[in-house]
Image (tube, grey):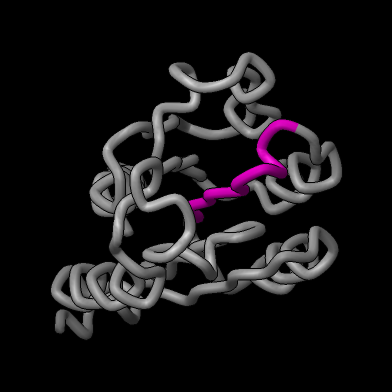
Amino acid sequence: MNKAKRDSGRRILVVNGPNLNLLGRREPDQYGRTTLKEIEDELRSCADSRGAEIRFIQSNHEGELIDAIHKAIGWANAMIINAAGLTHSSVGLRDAVVAAALPTVEVHLSNIYRREEFRHHSLIAGVAAGQITGFGAFSYRLGIEAVLHLLDKKGL
């Protein structure tokens, strides 16, 4: 682990929305068989190897996710968010992302643009630095690489 980089403030919050606690069991044809814990373990390893600290929140409750983002203000330097079904409906979650003012990458396991029409619109995408969608659990790995790239560009 690169202590100098960690001390410089490379801290990442990963936000996971409703039903993602069921990854690996829920609709495996759509979302794969990788569990959320397995995704978190891989991201933790990747972040640690790059001198970054990472925290995770998963909740099925919108307000808990918003509170977690608020609590990360002043701690986190970047955020990865998979708002799941709230992606398409939560103005409050979108506003929390704006209020946090962190470089944010939105990720989705499935390609939301190849699914039902209502999933084609993300309230988060317009306030995120970018969006990664459709690569299964690897979407998160791409997301961590993206936020680390954004932090590198900021000199963190």
Q: Residue at x 48, y 18 (%)?
A: 113
User: Looking at the picture, how far across and down is residue 73, in whole percent?
Assistant: 67, 66
Q: Quadrant of the N terminus?
A: bottom left
Q: Residue at x 48, y 32 (%)?
A: 129
Query: Which range of residues does the magenta coloring cover?
Result: 79-88
135 in magenta: no
User: Looking at the picture, how far across and down is residue 130, in whole percent?
Assistant: 44, 30
Rendered view: 11 above or below 33: below
**Pick the front one: 154 or 97:** 97
Q: Residue at x 29, y 60 (%)?
A: 33
User: Looking at the picture, how far across and down is residue 43, in whole percent?
Assistant: 28, 68
Q: Is residue 69 left or right of residue 24?
A: right
Q: Residue at x 29, y 76 (%)?
A: 44
Q: In this figure, what is the number of numbered marks?
A: 0
Rendered view: 27 above or below 117: below
Q: Quadrant of the C terminus?
A: bottom left
Residue 96 visible in the displayed image: yes
**Pick the front one: 70 or 114:** 114
Residue 155 visible in the displayed image: no
User: Looking at the picture, how far across and down is residue 28, in whole percent?
Assistant: 36, 52
Rendered view: 5 above or below 130: below
